[in-house]
Amino acid sequence: MTFLSHRTHSAQGFKLFSVLLLAAILALFGWSVADRQARAANPPAAVLSLGGAITEIVYALGQGDRLIARDTTSTYPPEAEALPDVGYVRALSPEGVLSVGPDLILSEEGAGPPEAVEVIREASVPFVTVPERYSAEGVLKKIEVVGAALEVPDRAAVLSEAVGDALEGAMARAEARAGDRKRVLFILSTQGGRITAAGAGTGADALISMAGGVNALSDVEGYKPVSDEALVRAAPDVILMMDRGGDHGITDDALFSMPPLRLTPAGESRSVVRMDGLLLLGFGPRTAEAVDGLSAALYGEGS
Amino acid sequence: MAELSGVVPPVRNRLGRARALHWGLALALLGCCFLSLQIGAADVSLTALLGKVARGEALGAMERIVLLEIRLPRLAMGAMVGAALAVSGAVMQGLFRNPLADPGIVGVASGAGLGAILAIVLGAMLPGWFLALAGNQLVPWAAFVGGWGTTLLLYRVSTRGGRTSVATMLLAGIALGALAGALSGILVYMADDQQLRDLTFWGLGSLAGASWAKVLAAGPLIAVALCVAMFLGRALNGLALGEATAHHIGIDVQRMKTVAILAVACATGAAVAVSGGIGFIGIVVPHLLRLASGPDHRMLLPNAALLGAALLILADVIARTIIAPGELPIGIVTAVLGAPIFLWILLRRRGFVEV
Amino acid sequence: MLSATGIEVRYGDHLALRGIDFRARAGEVSAIVGPNGSGKTSLLGAITATVPYRGAVMLNGRDIAGQRPWELAAQRAVLPQAARLAFPFTVLEVVRLGLQAGTSGARDEVPMLALSRVGMTEHAGRSFQDLSGGEAQRVMLARVLAQVWAPVADGQPRWLLLDEPVASLDIAHQLQVMDLARDFARAGGGVVAVMHDLNLTALYSDAVTVLSRGRCLASGHPRDVMTDDTLSEAYGCSLRVSVPPAEGLPYILPQSAAQW
């Protein structure tokens, strides 16, 4: 909570500073900034959202009409895709960002390049970074931060409670379903025959355990290319992948014809689960859905 | 001269054509500069702004920021980097007597890449006060030091008894490049998800990170290196006949090699450090100019600076407007423009006996 | 005067020249002959400061070791055996490269005059890389001539140092090139030429140095040096030298082993 209030205070401070700065320019050049001042006094009406989960939260808070643009990863809900796309959050074009005319930028962690972010801050546009933690609490924290930045804390509290309840329910159901815990391997890519999979500390790792599974590759940190032998030793019961829709994805046949996978329990039973990437790894309002979906896919709908 | 009365020179003076081209390119560069300030994702243009100034109106904060803090440093950096890469390419091709050489041959690119990757992956391990001091500039400085250090090492390895063997340098460059690549590979394995994405974008090259701080850091290095390189024209012409003949016509070949290698390491190192890896400018620009006005390095080098700057500025305009408000990495634009030209060069060369 | 004393040239373990003394006078064509591997090109390399050597080379009374490349370039021009050009310079541009030494009283017409001397004027605008071997050789000679255009400058002779100047030329151009060399010498300059063709050597040179296995076998006027014994020993095959009375110059005929 202290973190949250600190954030909003600094955003307010920024706005105050921007008004003072604009006033100074006004005094120097005799240019009217009336409409800008008026805008700054009201809740931000032109919001740029950088990050798929953040965009989802904005819509879930019923504030979708305040969005004026989004980043490439913001693909849900479908109406978000109609917004102008300012590109990938790590390779922002400062002019592109400013050109959509935001009076508030909500961003996930790691926006860049640093120089671009610096220029954007210099342009006196409030820039709120939403913290990322891969847990149920992390999801709720995001909702709080976004709600505060949009100045709709009441709605945020309601959403937070609903999402919190849903997550609790989903995790309890997952716990109940899970008998013999399955070892799950999240494969990020199979590019060039080299398998890159999720180790500890990743979003996939967190979601797998929330869904009552065990990350088969918990002895490495982060997303790593994995050797054939390490894959065999990891012995996953199920392969988890992002559903990239059509041509990007690898077929089951191609996947299980990769020698190291053929030798795993997952390969023998040809168990693979595909889920939407943003749903799975976004840690947004739909995370409960992701937990439910994954646990059902792992252990079946029943019990 | 009675002897010559019957033999009026039938040759058109290509040096004259190159000089005319020089002024043409200067105009083209000005045009590209105008374009770069005029258009962009934001609804701000140079003409509108100049009109306001002429009418005595003050400028809006948005206009000032977009023009002075975004487009102008980008323009400056594009010009610097483009000129540095094109001139370095021309110098390297002259030095290695091969029109397909590029600055990467002296290890700048692989060294700078290794430096950048080191900074991205292991930067967090440095003491806090150092990180605070370096700020955003840690990766560019690491890249510059990496590129420069690799070139010096290569130069040391291939210099015996006061003579630098260009062939040894070529071979040692391949070995050092492989080593740097392997070390980078190890670091990539150690990198986390965020760092990996940073690496990917660093490798593609971009001017999106342009800032006055970078322009002021890299600008003087590039300016000095390019000024020095401009005096290499005569020596590189002589070197076209081989090292021995260059010496016979009065060129201090060893000194020229030292100067050329250091200038290229300096210019390319600084360029790569601020913009990442931007390909093809170093090969395509000198080649186009040789086709247009001959291989005389005395005009090739200044013309390469102009054309390199103009092309990179143009590529940047394309990169930041074609998918506005998003932006393509400029390395993609130069590769898309440059790769076909490069292939065309290779196909043309097949017709010749040489090499 | 060009003099080399106690010249040793070593390539790794191989001693190519074992302490040679060589002297060439201005106003003369001095030829260096000898079989393959006898050290001709090494000797020229030492004189031109192209290869590392031990000993002393004096050019117009000054040791070349202490002189800067451009100081040497103002006094002598060097024709290499073969040159590969890296970029598509035109013939005229190649000839101009020699001028860039800047100290030969570089006038604009010199390169064209030099080209006309070797009969390549009409090729001035062609790409050097497209020339035949013989044409390229003549253009290179024009470049060398342009570099030291005046045989005597500031009271000092200038030097043409030629490595097999007629190697890839037809008979007419061989004579043309050797005439140019002799004219340069007659005008007060110095010419040193590494030669393969013994008869051309006899015809054009004022002094001959015969090398064999890195040593100097004989040197002096062709009439005195080019004898059956010396040449047969140098080349390791039987050669018969005859002196037709009209010209008074040696003429060398190879003999088969059986006739010897």
Image (cartoon, coloured by chain):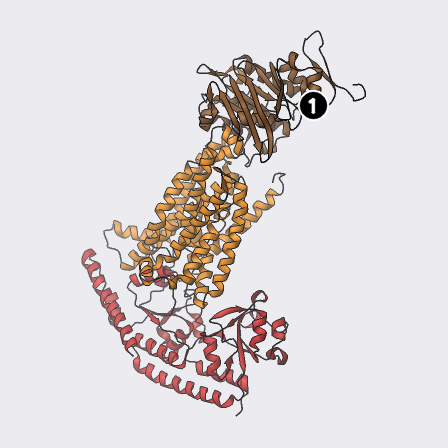
Chain colours: A red, B orange, C brown
**Residue at the right extreme?**
C258
Image height of A7 relative to B258, above or below: below
**Residue at the top extreme?**
C246
- With B152 as the anchor, is A48 left or right in this view? left
Q: Residue at x 41, y 75 (%)?
A: A53
User: Residue B298 sits in which quadrant?
Assistant: top left
Question: For the residue marked with disc 1, what is the amino acid?
Answer: Tyr
- With C251 as the anchor, is A28 left or right in this view? left
Camera-side residue of A267 and C71: C71
Residue C187 at what x, y percent from top left? Answer: 53, 13
According to the image, label 1 marks what residue? C235
Q: Residue at x 49, y 51 (%)?
A: B279
Residue B181 at what x, y percent from top left? Answer: 51, 56
Image height of A23 relative to B258, above or below: below
Camera-side residue of C157 and B158: B158
Q: Is residue C219 visible?
A: yes
Residue A189 at what x, y percent from top left? Answer: 54, 69
Image height of A85 relative to B30, above or below: below
Q: Residue at x 48, y 88 (%)?
A: A175
Image height of A68 relative to B34, above or below: below
**Residue at the left extreme?**
A27
- Placement of the N terminus of chain A among the 4 image quadrants: bottom left
